[in-house]
Image (cartoon, rainbow, N blue to C red):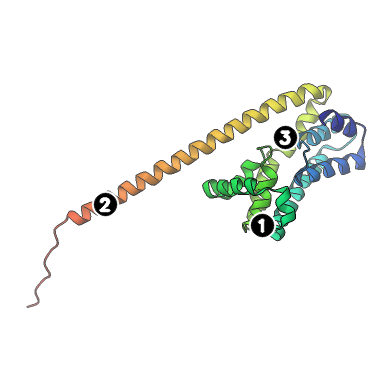
Amino acid sequence: MKDWLIALLGSTAGLTAYGLVFLILLAAGFGLPLPEDIPLVMGGVLVHRGQADLAAMILIGYLGIIIGDSVMFLLGRRFGSSKFFLRIVSPAARARVEGMFKKHGEKIVMLARFLPGIRTPTYFTAGSVGMNYWRFMIYDSIAALASAPVFVVLGYYFGADIESLLTRIAAGERNVIIALVVLVVIGVLFNRWRSRRDKKANADALSKLEGQPVEPPTKLS
């Protein structure tokens, strides 16, 4: 798949290149097993070769990600309980994502972009559980802005050695995923510690109040 995408995109230029990058990202957003980083990096490589414009390619990459994610979100909003879409997003995957929403809140939308196999079920589930669309857009846009421009620029600057670049990106993505998981675990542990601390402080304050002597009512003369 990787070699096929590299060969396909490497032979394009101009509007054809923009359109193909956009369509591949859109298909990846729909849940098809297509890597998102390769079309973005190859878009940068095409800029390096003079076959596309850098700003236009970054914009196309961003729009391809956002529109694909938004379509999946809106499908979840409209057809969340449909039997047809339950074949695409299995009940097990949906239950797992709903559990992640309960633990980590809506910010899981940002984290999901960097977790292979989780992104599509997360965005579909976000729509089906009634998450506000504009809040979804904000979180998703932040994550997209952390990936689309970076990959395109990397392809632009290191386009002469695409194989080495993709290998380094794959290793870097694993490190990012590990770092994100560690941060999530730390956040959960910190929230639990803070909750226990607050409960203890409230219990101590209540016990002090209960231990104070009650003054008798003042007699009216």
Q: CA distance from mark 1 to mark 2?
A: 42 Å
List x then y, in percent, for residue 132. 63, 58
Residue drawn at point x = 64 percent, y = 49 percent: 91
Mark 3 element type = helix
Amino acid on which disc 2 is placed: Ala
The amino acid beneath tag 1 is Tyr
Read off the residue under disc 2.
Answer: 205
Mark 2, secondary structure of its residue: helix
Tell me, for residue 46, which label it has, or none: none
Q: Determine crowd level at label 1: few under 14, some 14-19, many 20+ residues with C-alpha closer than 10 A.
A: some
Q: Of the two numbered discs 3 and 2 on the same chain, state the one appearing first in sequence.
A: 3
Q: Residue at x 6, y 78 (%)?
A: 221
> Of the numbered discs in the image, which one, if any, rests on residue 133?
1
The residue tagged 3 is: 150
Q: CA distance from mark 3 to mark 2?
A: 51 Å
Identify which residue is drawn at 68% across, 37% down.
116
Residue 158 left/right relative to 92: right
Q: Position of residue 102 (x, y in %)?
A: 53, 50
Nearer to us of marks 3 and 1 is 1
Residue 26 screen position, x and y as percent: 80, 46
Q: Is residue 200 above or below residue 2?
A: below
Q: Quadrant of the N terminus?
A: top right
